[in-house]
Image (cartoon, helix red, strand yellow):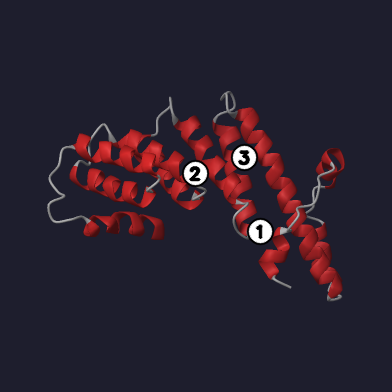
């Protein structure tokens, strides 16, 4: 993964005297850099913490605060990376729904920042379905359902844009394919306002 390579290559950037420190040293510096708004520095200290203290009980907290810090700074890919790592290494029955919810939040908010394609929407909606199947009694279910609805509406808007493109090109069969993917019932019940800058415009740039 590219994100992982970026983070863990940070170890090479440490000064020569910055090694063999206690886990608390690295953790305190992670917190300090986050407070200063220097997330690159915080990532560097995290790389040192996890490389020198792979079994430290401070690692889960470090992953969590870094994921949340990157999400606040709208660096959603990095946020999702940290939440993924947390789930892989420290996920359990008590925290899996919360961390998965944070991961879905990263994906949900990240849609504002860049063009997304059908695969992104399909994967994301699958992740929402998976959450609801795995954690049907979670306190976060209403929030996940709300994000899921907004994702379906976003996918509808993208499909409408694609229909429009194919219609202008007189490719009716292709247009109908995407027209059939639009959730008309949800559109009718929610009456969504179109995005100011539609995703399909940024996606196709036509």
- Identify whether 153 is placed above or below 166: above
Q: Is residue 64 above or below residue 184?
A: above
Pair 1/3: label in front: 1
Number of the label disc, if any, that sits on residue 71? 2
Where residue 84 appears, as percent x and y from the top left, is 43, 44
Badge 2: residue crowd in 10 Å (few <14, some 14–19, many ≥20): many
Name the spot of residue 203 as percent of width and height, x first: 67, 65
Q: Position of residue 93 (x, y in %)?
A: 43, 27
User: On the image, numbered disc 3 is attached to which residue?
Assistant: 129
Which of the 4 image quarters holds residue 136? top right
Can you tell which of label 2 and label 3 is closer to the viewer?
Answer: 2
Of label 2 and label 3, which has the lower sequence position?
A: 2
Looking at the image, do the residues carrying marks 1 and 3 touch, with CB atoms under 8 Å apart?
Answer: no
How much space separates mark 1 and mark 3, taking CA atoms? 16 Å
Q: Residue at x 20, y 41 (%)?
A: 53
Q: Which residue is mark 1?
A: 118
Residue 79, percent across and down?
A: 46, 46
Asked if marks 2 and 1 touch (Cβ < 8 Å), the reply is no
First of labels 1, 3 by sequence position: 1
Identify the element where label 2 is drawn. helix
């Amino acid at each position: 993964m590219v994100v992982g390579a970026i983070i863990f290559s940070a170890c090479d950037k440490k000064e020569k005297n910055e090694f063999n420190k206690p886990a608390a040293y690295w953790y305190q510096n992670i917190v300090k850099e986050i407070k200063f708004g220097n997330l690159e520095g915080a990532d560097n200290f995290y790389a040192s913490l996890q490389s020198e203290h792979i079994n430290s009980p401070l690692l889960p907290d470090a992953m969590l605060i870094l994921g949340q810090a990157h999400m606040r700074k709208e660096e959603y890919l990095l946020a999702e990376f940290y939440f993924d790592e947390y789930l892989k290494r420290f996920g359990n029955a008590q925290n899996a729904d919360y961390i998965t919810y944070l991961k879905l939040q990263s994906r949900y908010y990240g849609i504002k920042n860049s063009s997304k394609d059908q695969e992104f929407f399909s994967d994301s909606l699958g992740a929402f379905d998976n959450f609801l199947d795995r954690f049907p009694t979670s306190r976060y279910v209403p929030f996940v359902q709300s994000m899921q609805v907004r994702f379906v509406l976003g996918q509808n808007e993208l499909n409408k844009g694609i229909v429009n493109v194919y219609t202008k090109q007189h490719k009716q069969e292709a247009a109908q394919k995407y027209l059939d993917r639009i959730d008309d019932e949800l559109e009718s019940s929610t009456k969504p306002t179109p995005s100011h800058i539609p995703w399909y415009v940024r996606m196709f740039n036509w």
